[in-house]
Amino acid sequence: MALVPDEWLKRSDMLDFKPTNDAYNSSGILVPISGIRPPRRNPGVRDFDQEQMLAILNGFASGTIIPPIKVFEARQAGEWKYEVYDGFHRFHASVSVGFKSIPVEVIQYGDLNALWPDRSVTQKNR
């Protein structure tokens, strides 16, 4: 599993961070990280964007409200209950700093409006 480089944790004063809560500050429902399949990048896509990761880590440190990750229920029964759709950086940042749970929003397969709320994907083209 990809972990945040120590240098980035140092830059955000998170290297010695010890969580006092199970998860970061968010409005989602809490799910144990162990119940979520770790997301991976497609071949050829770099693991982390440094600026995005540092912004998330700084948000953790300051208690900023950060959106929950979006997950689907796992398609196959097994080790994980959920699969990440949106939240690669938030997931790996949470693991790297020691959170036990992560806030999630469960999305149903086929619910395109939940995936892209700023687009009217269900409106008919005229």
Image (tube, rainbow, N blue to C red):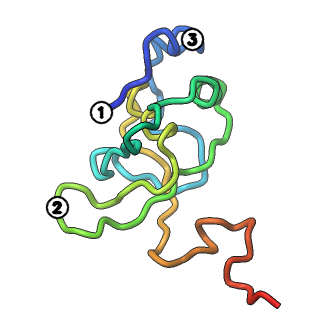
Q: Residues within 10 Å of mark 1 (few under 14, many from 20)?
A: few
| Amino acid at circle 3 | Asp
The residue under the point 37% across, 46% down is: 39
Q: Nearer the viewer, residue 82 or 109?
A: 109
Classify mark 3: helix, strand or loop.
loop
Q: CA distance from mark 3 to mark 1?
A: 22 Å
**Residue 18 percent across, percent down from the top left:** 44, 20
Q: Using the image, determine if residue 30 lies above or below residue 21.
A: below
**Residue 68 percent across, percent down from the top left:** 55, 51
Classify mark 1: helix, strand or loop.
loop
Query: Mark 3 or mark 1: which is in front?
Result: 1
The residue under the point 44% across, 52% down is: 30
Instruction: State the quadrant of the C terminus.
Output: bottom right
Residue 78: mark: 2
Q: CA distance from mark 3 to mark 2?
A: 37 Å
Give the residue number, with chain letter if any, for mark 3: 13
Tell whether label 1 touches label 3 (CB within 8 Å).
Answer: no
The residue under the point 60% across, 70% down is: 114
Where is residue 1, by image quadrant? top left
The residue most toward the front is 44
Q: Nearer the viewer, residue 23 or 95?
A: 95
The residue most toward the left is 78
Q: Earlier in the sequence, mark 2 or mark 1?
A: 1
